[in-house]
Image: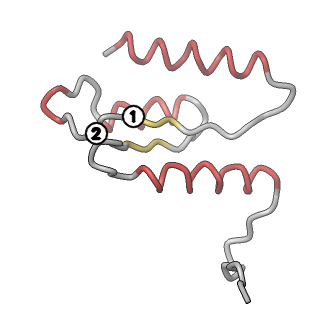
Amino acid sequence: MEQSFEMIRLIRDKILDTMESDRPLIIVGNKADLEVQRQVSFEELKEVGKEFGGVPVMECSAKSNYNVDEVFESIVKEIEKMEGGEDEDKEEKGCVVS
């Protein structure tokens, strides 16, 4: 378990060291369908997110398609927030095909 957290910290530090400016981060635990083999609880993962300054935390499973779309939607929302392009009160705009 601690090895997983150390790897997350190492990867985060490398990302931050190579970027010219802040970029959005999301911690995603994968293989959520393997509950029996779980080594890290979601609560522990949320604590790491808090340690990183409130980084959003999610779990997903590609095998069962659990939260896969939501992970990508969250990444886009975080990018939009950082770029100032998201307004919570705005209506969603869709594509019009004619």
Viewer-nearest residue: 68 or 80: 68
Q: Residues within 10 Å of mark 1 (few under 14, many from 20)?
A: some
Disc 2 residue type (three-letter)? Ala
Check the image and report above or below for 53 versus 85. above
**Residue tagged by mark 1?**
29
Instruction: From the image, tell me which residue sits under label 2.
Output: 32
Measuring from the top left, give residue 32's x and y in whole percent: 28, 39
Q: Nearer the viewer, residue 67 or 95?
A: 95
Q: Are marks 1 and 2 in contact (CB under 8 Å)?
A: yes
Disc 1 from disc 2: Cα separation = 7 Å
- Type of residue at label 1? Gly
**Eyeballing the image, is 15 above or below 85?**
above
Residue furthest out toward the left:
36
Indicate how the structure is coloured in the image: secondary structure
Residue projecting furthest to the right: 20
Mark identifier at residue 93: none
Residue 86 relative to residue 7: left or right: right
Pick whichever, 1 or 63, lies toward us: 63
Report whether 70 appears left or right of 96. Answer: left
Q: Quadrant of the N terminus?
A: top left
**Under tag 1, what secondary structure?**
strand
Indicate the quadrant containing the C terminus: top left, top right, bottom left or bottom right: bottom right
Residue 54: x and y in percent read 57, 41
Tell me the residue at 36%/12% (across/down): 2
Q: Position of residue 75 (x, y in %)?
A: 61, 48
Point 30% across, 34% down: residue: 31
Residue name at image x 46 percent, y 37 percent: 28
